[in-house]
Image (spheres, rainbow, N blue to C red):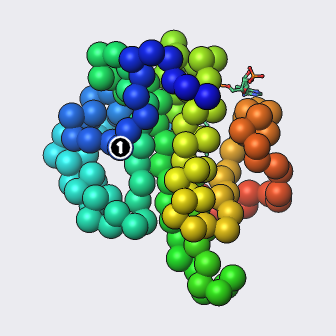
Amino acid sequence: MALPEGYTFRKLQLSDYETYVENLKVLTTVGEVSLESFTELLNHWQSLPELYHPYVISNVEGSVVATGMLLIERKLIHECGLVGHIEDISVSKVEQGKKLGYHMISSLTSIAQELGTYKVILDCSPENVGFYEKCGFKNSGIEMVRRF
Ligand code: ACO
């Protein structure tokens, strides 16, 4: 499915600082993240390009309107197989319902498949199960957490 005209699926870049941080606020608490901290984090992600695959969808103005992170985990099981983890999916409130979330998940899933993973997994709240089912995922267990 094509993105709306003028929208682009691309890697996260330094100039996305403000709109990336703002966009993620629809997902959870972001807190204060300075440009310096963002730069350091992006440098870290970019220093481990096999592991971190941070993507965005930007609009005509170049502002981030959707975010998504793909992590590639190298395991020993499944003959040293690779597993993709999808994290931090957010679509800005005014852009929801335009299939941007679907496009983000489909694109990250395709990248994970091209990179040779045998599965892609993610955690979500019960309210988002229907969305991920529309993206081709199925419920496969229960998330456990211990918060600190
Ligand atoms: N429950 C059921 N179906 C849904 C939901 C939902 N919560 N959200 C969207 N859908 C459906 C749509 O109706 C559409 O169906 P259709 O193809 O029959 O028309 C289909 O799923 C695709 O919808 P999109 O337009 O691509 O959804 P959108 O771009 O609005 O993104 C998202 C959905 C990511 C859940 C967005 O609402 C959002 O950012 N929410 C707040 C943050 C959030 O909860 N993120 C996910 C966290 S989980 C994680 O990060 C791994």
Instruction: Report whether 108 appears left or right of 51.
Output: right
Task: Identify the residue shown where x is 63% and y is 32%.
Answer: 102
Q: Could you tell me which quadrant the N terminus lies in?
A: top right
Q: Is mark 1 within 8 Å of ligand 1?
A: no
Residue 56 in the image: above or below residue 36: above
Q: Position of residue 126 (x, y in %)?
A: 78, 39
Instruction: Report whether 137 appears left or right of 110.
Output: right
Q: Which residue is mark 1?
A: 11
Quadrant of picture, ligand 1: top right
Disc 1 crowd, CA 10 A, few/some/many (<14, 14-19, 20+):
some
Quadrant position of residue 136: top right
Q: Position of residue 65 (x, y in %)?
A: 43, 24
Task: Identify the residue shown where x is 68% and y is 63%.
Answer: 119
Residue 125 in the image: above or below residue 139: above
**Can residue 37 be seen here?**
no
Q: Secondary structure at mark 1?
A: strand
Residue 3 in the image: above or below residue 71: above
**Amino acid type of disc 1?**
Lys
Residue 53 in the image: above or below residue 38: below
